[in-house]
Image (cartoon, grey):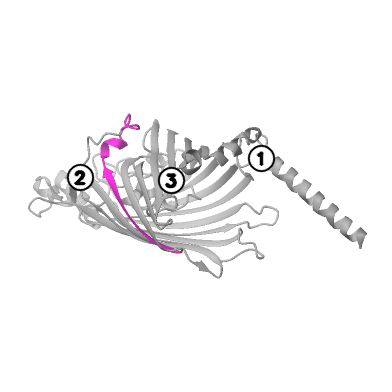
Amino acid sequence: MKMKHTNTRLLCQVSAVAALLMSANAMADDAFSANSKWMTGDWGGERTKLIEQGIDIKADYVGEMGANLHGGYNDDKTGRYSDQFGLGVALDLQKLWGWDNTQAKIQLTNRNGQNISNDRVGDPRAGTLSSSQEVYGRGHMVRLTQLWIQHQFLDGKLDVKAGYFGEGEDFNTFPCEFQNLAFCGSQVGNWATNIWYNWPVMQAALRVKYNITPEFYAQIGAYNQNPSQTEHGNGFKLSGSGTKGTVIPVELVWSPKVNNLPGEYRVGYYKSTAPASDVREDVNGNDAATTGDAYRTHSSKHGYWFVAQQQLTSHNGDASRGLNIAANATFHDKDTNIVDNYQSLMFVYKGPFDARPKDDVGIGFARIHVNDDVKKNAELINADNGISDYNNPLYAPLRSTEYNYEINYGFHVTNWLTVRPNLQYITHPGGVDQVDNALVAGLKIQSVF
C-alpha cells in the first residue's frame, strides 16, 4: 500500500513538472516555430505577458496572386499580385486601467499591388462585378481602419461600441476563407453601391447590441456615409466634411447548436438616408438616356440580407474537423442600385486528412445579377449614340448576370501561415455576354506576425 501511494505521488509530481515544462515551452515559442501562434514567436514570453496585462498586438499579412489562364476580355496571359499589411493593438481596459467590461482597438492597414480582374478578366468599360483578388482595392496607401471603444452593460446583455469602424465588422459579417470576393467577407458592402464601405475603410459609427438569450441577439447601428473617406490621401480623415447621410443597419443573429455542432444565422436590413440617383429614370419619370435630363434623385436607398453558416459533421468525433456549409443572399433597391440581388453557396471541409488535420478544402458558387434597368439604360445610351458594335470603344456594354466559382485547398503550413492555391472560373465576367468565360489561377498567403 505504501508503494502504491509513493508511485501515485511520484506520478503526480512528474505530471506537474511536465505541465510546467509544456507551459514554459508554449510561452517561449521561438520565431518561426511551427507551434507558435505568431511568426515572430512569443518574444521570450513577453508577448504573453502583454496579453495578460491587456495589450494584444496584432500584425498580419495577406498576399494574393491571380493569373488568367484562359478566356476573359484580354487573353494575353499575365500574373498580378496584391497584398495587405495590418498592424494594430486590442486593449482590455479592465486589465489595463480597471475599466470594467471595456475594450478598445486601433488598427492600421496598407494595401498595394494590382488586380487581374480589372483589364484581363473583365471589359474595362464595365469591369467585373466580383474580383479574383479580394484583398485589392481602396488605394495604395496606409489607412486607419479601426479606432473604437466598446463597453458591456447590464451584466453583459447590452453591448455598445463607438468610434471609427466599418459596418462589416458587426453586420452581415462573414469569414474570408476564399480568394474570390464573391465568397469573402461582408457581401452587402460589395453590392450596395457607394454607401456601405467594407474593410479597410472606416466611418464614424455607433453600434448597439442586446443579447436576448445566450444564442440570440439583436443589434442596430448608425454609420456616417462619407464618400470622401474612400479617396486617396484620406485614410486618416476623422472630420465629417463630405458627409452625405447615414447608413442604418439592423440585424437579428441566432447562433444555435445543431447536433452539438455550431451554426450562425443572420437576417438584416439597411437604409441609407443619403440622396441616391435613379439608374434609369429622369426627374419626370422618363428615360434619362433618351431625354438628356438629369437622373431622378431618391431620398434614400435600402436593402436586406440573409447569412447562414452551419457545421454539418464532425470527423471521428473531432468537432474541429468536418464539413461546413454557408450561404449568402443580398437584395437591393432596384431604383438606385446597380446590382439588385446576389446569392452564394459554399462548402468547406476542415481537416480532410488525418495526416493534415488543420488543412481545409473549399468550393463555392456565386451568382451576381445586374438590375434590368441598368441594362436597359445602356441599351438606350447606345441607341441614342447610334452605336451597335460591341467593339466600338464608345459602346456601353450590356450587363446581366455574372457567375463565380472557386475551388481551393488551404495548406496549414504552421499555426501562423496558411497557403491557399485555388482555381476560379468566371462566367460572363461583368455580366457581359460578349466576354469569354475566364479561368483564373490564384494563390492566397495568410500570415500572422
In the rendered structure, are the residues bearing label 1 and label 2 in contact, judged by CB atoms less than 8 Å apart?
no
Q: Circle 2: is it few (<14), some (14-19), or many (20+) Cα within 10 Å?
A: some
Left or right of 362 on screen, residue 100 = left
The residue where tag 2 is placed is 387
Q: Nearer the viewer, mark 3 or mark 2?
A: 3
Look at the numbered disc 3 and give the secondary structure of its residue. strand
Badge number at residue 27: 1
The residue where tag 3 is placed is 102
Look at the numbered disc 1 and give the secondary structure of its residue. helix
Q: Residue, x 63% and y 52% (percent of image)?
A: 358
Look at the numbered disc 2 and give the secondary structure of its residue. loop
| Amino acid type for the residue under numbered disc 2 | Ile
Q: Which residues are magenta?
A: 215-237
Is 152 in front, or is 338?
152
In the rendered structure, are the residues bearing label 3 and label 2 in contact, judged by CB atoms less than 8 Å apart?
no
| Amino acid type for the residue under numbered disc 1 | Met
Q: Circle 1: is it few (<14), some (14-19), or many (20+) Cα within 10 Å?
A: some
Left or right of 381 on screen, residue 161 = right
| Amino acid type for the residue under numbered disc 3 | Thr
Residues at marks 1 and 2, CA–CA distance in whole angstroms:
68 Å
Q: Residue, x 33% and y 40% (percent of image)?
A: 124
Q: Circle 3: is it few (<14), some (14-19), or many (20+) Cα within 10 Å?
A: many
Is 387 in front, or is 239?
239
Residue 449 appears in which quarter of the rendering?
A: top right
| Relative image position of residue 353 (x, y in whole percent) | 67, 57
Residues at marks 3 and 1, CA–CA distance in whole angstroms:
26 Å
Badge number at residue 227: none
Residues at marks 3 and 2, CA–CA distance in whole angstroms:
61 Å
| Relative image position of residue 198 (x, y in whole percent) | 37, 45
Q: Earlier in the sequence, mark 3 or mark 1?
A: 1
